[in-house]
Amino acid sequence: MQETSSQDVTMITCTAPVNIAVIKYWGKRHEELILPINSSLSVTLHQDQLKTTTTVACSRHFQEDRIWLNGKEEDINQPRIQSCLREIRRLARKRRSDEDLSNDISLAHRVHICSVNNFPTAAGLASSAAGYACLVYSLSRLFGVDGELSLVARQGSGSACRSMYGGFVQWKMGERQDGKDSLAEQVEPESHWPELRVLVLVVSAERKLVGSTSGMQTSVKTSKLLKHRADCVVPGRMEEMISAIQRRDFAAFGELTMKDSNQFHATCLDTYPPIFYLNDISQKVISLVHRYNQHYQDTRVTYTFDAGPNAVIYTLEDHVPEFIQVVRYFFPPETNGGEFVKGLPVGPASLSEDLKTAIGLEPVPKGISYIISTKVGPGPCVVEDPKLHLLNPEGLPKKST
């Protein structure tokens, strides 16, 4: 275990990725344990572009557990944070009683936790999934806990269980009432489909009007379509999606991804009162993708939207330069501000008049704030360099955080 000790403070830093579901999770059958009404499947994005970094420290000198998120101290007593802390300490106690590891870090010691995202938290980019996955992974390394950590991460944020793995990951809904079989499992590693690329089109960084937790609760109570989706649609789609990924069949992967995103947002509209996560720009992106594919008579790009207006585009490496130019043409960015495309470099491309005419939408200046260009990536990992700890030797946040 890579750890740093100073003045009786033991410290470890880890990073964890964002994941974006292509078969969506929406609705719980058990609120406290966060057990879903259907299975789901996601793609883990690369941490070079999107990640949470968390440092955890413990010491006999700490008076209480404390947590800082993105530079601000938060309430450590939030039920979901407490749930993760309690479960990791329980697993650590169990391991010690099984193996008599009396020399290990005392479980009576308090912990200090400091966590930052390298992407805007309010932009709706699955920050809670990366955050809780990173919290659980860091605590597990600190206390020497192994085992099925996705079960613990799930109790912080449902989709966090999928961020415990890289590549392509399914969250099996499970059947047991105690949730012990509701866990994440890697379908294929990040190396499986090297040509796959991901473009996050950031439409709006505003906070959404309806949070995911309350939105799900209302949908479960009021949407008949949600029940039909969970019982009759998702089980078959999970099988088809796993097969499409294993075969690297982009056309099948793309069509399923778009249909599932559309049905998820249809259940939001079928909720009473209805929930609107997509805005005018989101709807224009959907039209643009379908018209682009129609022009080529081929599924070259695919969209998915979580509970927010930002589009996540999956495509193959060869199509990235042209599609970025399409987005730039129909959503012209501000000329005097920042980079429009962040992340993986994208080569130049020109657009034919035929393609512009086929898409035929009215350009919307500044409709897209920026694009994050990324790819499939690995699961959580330990940061080896102690200089990158977010806490100082006394266990308090460094000034830069």
Image (cartoon, rainbow, N blue to C red):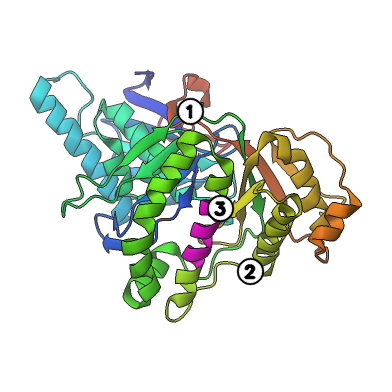
364 left or right of 317? Answer: right
Q: Quarter of the image for the C terminus: give it.
A: top right
> Which of labels 2 and 1 is toward the front?
2
Q: Quarter of the image for the N terminus: give it.
A: top left
The image position of residue 208, as x and y in percent, is 54, 66
The image position of residue 84, as x and y in percent, is 28, 45
Q: Earlier in the sequence, mark 3 or mark 2?
A: 3
Residue wearing tag 3:
255
Is the Cβ of the residue at disc 2 closer than 8 Å to that at disc 1? Answer: no
Residue wearing tag 1:
389
Residue extent of the magenta highlight: 255-265
10 Å crowding of disc 2: few (<14), some (14-19), many (20+): few
What predominant SS class does the magenta segment belong to? helix
Q: CA distance from mark 2 to mark 1?
A: 39 Å
Under circle 2, the secondary element is loop
Q: Earlier in the sequence, mark 2 or mark 1?
A: 2
184 left or right of 175? Answer: right
What amino acid does circle 3 point to?
A: Glu
10 Å crowding of disc 3: few (<14), some (14-19), many (20+): some
Residue occupying image coordinates x 34% and y 37%: 185
What amino acid does circle 2 point to?
A: Asn
Is residue 64 visible in the rendered structure shown here? no
> Which of labels 3 and 2 is toward the front?
3
Q: How many marks?
A: 3
Residue wearing tag 2:
279
